Image (cartoon, grey):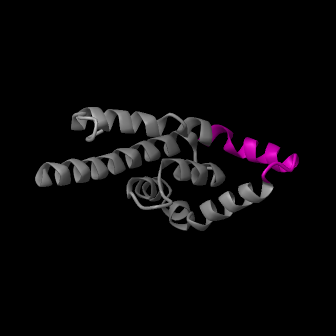
Amino acid sequence: GYLYGFSLTKTLIITIFANLVPIPFILLFIKQIFKFMEKHNILTSVISKLKNRAMGKSHRIETLEFWGLMFYVGIPLPGTGAWTGALIASLLNIEFKKAMISIFCGILMAAVIMSLGVYGVFHFVF
């Protein structure tokens, strides 16, 4: 957003909305989609890798549920984020409403961290 001249507020709104759009669909349908694809031998190795990778990162989320999922999504590191968090929440059978609120809070946290970092650095340097 910064490079397009968007305000911090506009950037945050766009970022949060764009990250949230696929989350309900992932939470509600990913297991059924995976099951269908596995049944029909469609990309089974890819699905297996996705599941293994997601579940390999799920220990803290499983233990702390709401807070674990929120911080997993909210701390902007490679391999973390809302989509992976939603996949993990779905595979762990975390209640939809709890997962949505936790992921939303995580998206807010990541958006603020990244936006303040970018806007702060560019404002300071330029």
The quarter holding residue 33 reads top right
The quarter holding residue 9 reads top left
The image shows residue 71 at horizontal and vertical percentages of 40, 57
The image shows residue 82 at horizontal and vertical percentages of 48, 48
Residue at 55% across, 48% down: 86
Residue at 30% across, 38% down: 1
The image shows residue 30 at horizontal and vertical percentages of 68, 43
Residue at 46% across, 46% down: 103
Q: Residue furthest right?
A: 40
Q: Main secondary structure of the magenta part?
A: helix
The image shows residue 18 at horizontal and vertical percentages of 44, 35
What number of labels is visible?
0
The vertical placement of 60 against 22, above or below, is below
Give the extent of the magenta segment: 27-43
Which of 124/49 is in front?
124
Q: Is residue 42 left or right of residue 124?
A: right
Q: Is residue 111 left or right of residue 124?
A: right
Query: Does the magenta-highlighted stretch encompass residue 78?
Result: no
Residue at 52% across, 52% down: 85
Which of 47/91 is in front?
47
Query: Does the magenta-highlighted stretch encompass residue 35?
Result: yes
